[in-house]
Image (cartoon, coloured by chain):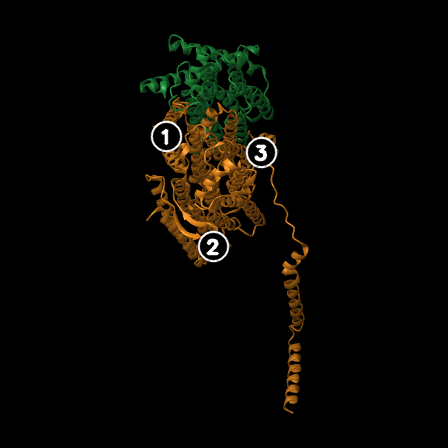
Chain colours: A green, B orange
Amino acid sequence: MGQVAQVTVAQVIGLAVLNLVLIVGLAPLAEGVMRRIRAIVHSRKGPPLIQPYLDILKLLGKEDLVPEAGVLWQIGPPLCLGAVLMAALLTPLGTPPPLAFAGDAIVFIYFVALAGIAIMLGAFASGNPYAYVGASREMMMIFSVEPVAAIALVTAAVKAGSLSFPKMMESYAAAGPSVSMVVAGVAFLLALQAQVGKLPFDIPEADQEIMEGPFIERSGPGLALFKLASYAKMLIFGSILVQIFVPLPRLVAWPVDVVVNFALVGVLVVVVGLVNAVNPRLRIDQSMSYFSRIVVFVAVAGLAVASIGY
Amino acid sequence: MTPVQAVMHAVAVLAIGAAVTAIVSRSRTASAYLALLFVAVASGLALWAGGASLTGAESGSAPATVAVVSGIGASLTLAVDRFTAFFLLIIGVMAFLSTLYSTSYMRIYQREHAARYYPMLLLFFAGVIGVVSVRDWFFFFVFWEFMTICSYFLVIFDKEDPTILRAGFKYIVVTHVAAIFMLIAALVLWHTSEPHSFSFASSAQAMGALGRSSPIVLHVLLALWLIGFATKAGILPFGDWLPDAYPAAPTGATAAFAGTMTKLGIYGLLRVFVDLLPASEFSVVWGLVIAALGTGSIFVGTITALSQDDAKRLMSFHVIGQMGYMFLGIGMGIYFLPTQPTLALVGILAGTFHLLNHVCYKSLLFCTAGSLRLRAGTQALHEMGGLARVLPLTAVMAAIGSLSIAGVPPFNGFASKWLIYQLSVIGGIGFPLLLLFGLVAFFISLVTLASFLKYLGAAFFGQPSDHVAALQGKRNDVPGGMQAPQVVLGLACVAFGLFPMLPLTAVYRAITPLTTALSGTTLAGTLGTSVLGLTFTPDGVAAGVWYPLASAIALAICVAISYGIARMAQAPSRVVPVWYCGVDLPQRLGHFHPHGMYEPFRRAFERVYVKIGTPKTAYPTTLVKIFDVDTWLYGPLVKAGGRVAERFSRSHVGIPQWYLVWQVVGMVLVLVVLFSVMR
């Protein structure tokens, strides 16, 4: 277990609290930045940066309209946000991931998928056919995007000889930049837009055609949790991209590493926000063929390069 | 009592039970409960034999020879080594649970005779127990064929449906062709061994000798074995019979097939390729072939499952896909057997652990499909909907089974798939093809998820279809006899998921005596010492970790935090009707048709599964005419009889005067005769 085993219980809890606070606290800000960018592109003034915080706070107090009282309906939103927070606990944010002793990259990917499952089960529980359409699209997005992330992470694992995030970071920082990791990073970046559900890939929600799809029946606190989960994904995937696919040296103290991490994630937020502002929505089949091309040409190429040792 | 004796007693009890249930079969209830009683006794014996051998100190009891067929060198030799013991445990549990399920489920068949079900089911279990216990190819085939024929009669139980008869015909033809392949391989080994013998021990020696003298022959033999076992396991392209035959059988029997018979393909595979075949370059070649076959099955089987509408047919295609995962894990293990024992151990562990997990969740899922059939009267997903309100506990169990088969943490399917991914990544560093296999397996695990979310969404949630609306949505879950197996299997899925080290220890004890190549490895050195989780350490370096209990607790805390956030402002809640964007739709129009789900994805992979049709058999026409007794004998006889009866009936006109006339005529005739005689 090496370095991982030496972390004490107190450190794990401290790191866990730090991760949760950072992710939940900063996620709406990232969304606020993206809204502002969209407004700038549209030549509008745009909402204040803290608007998403206000949205969520307001939603938390709004009346919760329940179309069909069932346990599954109640479980959906907390399970979705819970799975995203669990993924956050497995994510390195400049600090080692607090739950690195309990799960590796594969576990991370599956917890991200669990968030999608929670959205779909919540949609099924609503009994609304639009929600079913949205859920079916959500699933198709999962299986076009997750393989890209998986192949990119496996590339990193092949380079490091290990699937655990701290080992990957360690070995990449020690070995320095390599062709395969750059290609894998590009593949991960290309999938990022869809992972966070932004245009042109907000197909499951598609508010103009299927009225927010899985969330059509949601109001109040449930909707707030789903929104918070979707904002948090931006920071989580941004951090993974920065920490795993950029060979960052460890700096003097961990707060500096965290600041560097979020500065780079901020750059990603701007990029994602710009792409989001200038693109129309794709159809689901177009997006699937887009990702199948990325998988075949970019991600697999990176993996192939990695397996011959570059 | 030794384990071998216990196994013999179990087979005897099942045989007696089959006779008794056949005798009392006029009463459905009596034969059902007697069958349950006999299976319970036999299961207890099998479990005792399995448990005693698996936990025992030595690697298994000595083989006991019961009968000898001296002329051909065959002997009925039984042995319970730890590997057999592992399968006996599975068989013991599944036999009892599926019989228990059947006692309630068989009520839906009102017209069929009970004698066609319970005796066959009991004989089937006897055959299965025999297959895993014998140590002689001759009797292996006796039990194997016995099992196949009994299962055939279970498949065609509902014989009024011609599609079921066709499925049964395809099943028996395909599996027999496969059995002939294996028989050829066994005969060649019999011929090679000196003195001629069918016993496993002499086969192993013959294989070793063949490997040195004529490798081509050994390759051919291994190919024949592989085809035979892959056919039984349902691996494509040989397992084409499976998606037709499994849905045809009554669900209790399907659960038994999924829990025992299909797994015997894996039993045979490990027996031949790990136990009998010495670790050599043959292992490398055939390990790769097995892994490649498995990957193909994973891909084609699961993608095809996505577009199925019949619940049991959907699950049957998933059997093919899931057997592919086992083949992939075990194949990679066999590939590494001569070179890297640690990786080999992980591969065989992963495949065999996946087998155990698959027994739990696939039998569970088949049971839930049967429960739906009992309550909703249908297996077609588009005719269901909203059934969670009618069958709440079944819905929960179906959700557990679905998440387990999709490999969602922390359920059991994830633990074994996690091992397979670990091995394909770490093993793939040296041999990149394994990376590709692993990525296909990962992608398909998402497709599995999609497919079972469709099952859940279409059957249990959403608006009820017309069909279900007629049930009036009253809570009416299945009887205890069907609920108990579901709950037990569901709990097993959760328990094996949270504590994977416990079943893995049993699997480790079961597989290590098979080959000396694994003797240098330890479970603690490969997967860590903690009972709470797995730390994969291939070369002393931790390559991956999975601590399910810690993750589950952390997830629970995260969900609790999220729930806390949601309830922070104490928002009021109100029940409202479903909103169809302002249109006032009747409920049935709000029913979502599961056909449409994943349509773009389905279209992209439409051509992936090529169905192999049963060849049309043509007999010589004269033969057909001779055997067609209906045409030349019964038909004409019936017609002639009909004509006579019709002539006779013309005299019955129903008018009294005519009857009087006949009586007068008759009397005159009688008088004439009397007078002529007396004169």
Q: Secondary structure at mark 1?
A: loop
Where does the image place residue A156, in percent across and percent down from the top left? 48, 19
Instruction: Give how far apart the Cα atoms at labels 3 and 2 are.
Output: 40 Å
User: Which residue is under mark 3?
Assistant: B596
Whether marks 3 and 1 lie on the same chain: yes
In this rendered view, identify the residue nearer to me: B618 or B652.
B618
From the image, which quarter does the C terminus of chain B lie in? bottom right
Q: Secondary structure at mark 3?
A: helix
- Of badges 3 and 1, nearer the viewer stands 1
Q: Secondary structure at mark 2?
A: helix
Where does the image place residue B531, in percent across and percent down from the top left? 34, 30
Q: Chain of mark 3?
A: B
Q: Are marks 3 and 1 in contact (CB under 8 Å)?
A: no
Where does the image place residue B92, in percent across and percent down from the top left? 40, 45
Q: Are marks 1 and 2 in contact (CB under 8 Å)?
A: no
In this rendered view, identify the residue nearer to me: B583 or B616.
B616
The type of residue carrying mark 2 is Ala
- Of badges 3 and 2, nearer the viewer stands 2
The type of residue carrying mark 3 is Gly
Q: Are marks 3 and 2 in contact (CB under 8 Å)?
A: no
Q: Which image quarter: residue B466? A: top right
For the image, the number of numbered tags is 3
Q: Chain of mark 1?
A: B
In this rendered view, identify the residue nearer to me: B452 or B360.
B360
The type of residue carrying mark 1 is Thr
Instruction: Give how far apart the Cα atoms at labels 3 and 1 are.
Output: 50 Å
First-in-chain label (1 vs 2): 2
For the question of whether residue B29 can be seen, the reply is: no
In screen coordinates, is B13 left or right of B114?
A: left
Q: Chain of mark 2?
A: B
User: Which residue is under mark 2?
Assistant: B114
User: Which residue is under mark 1?
Assistant: B522
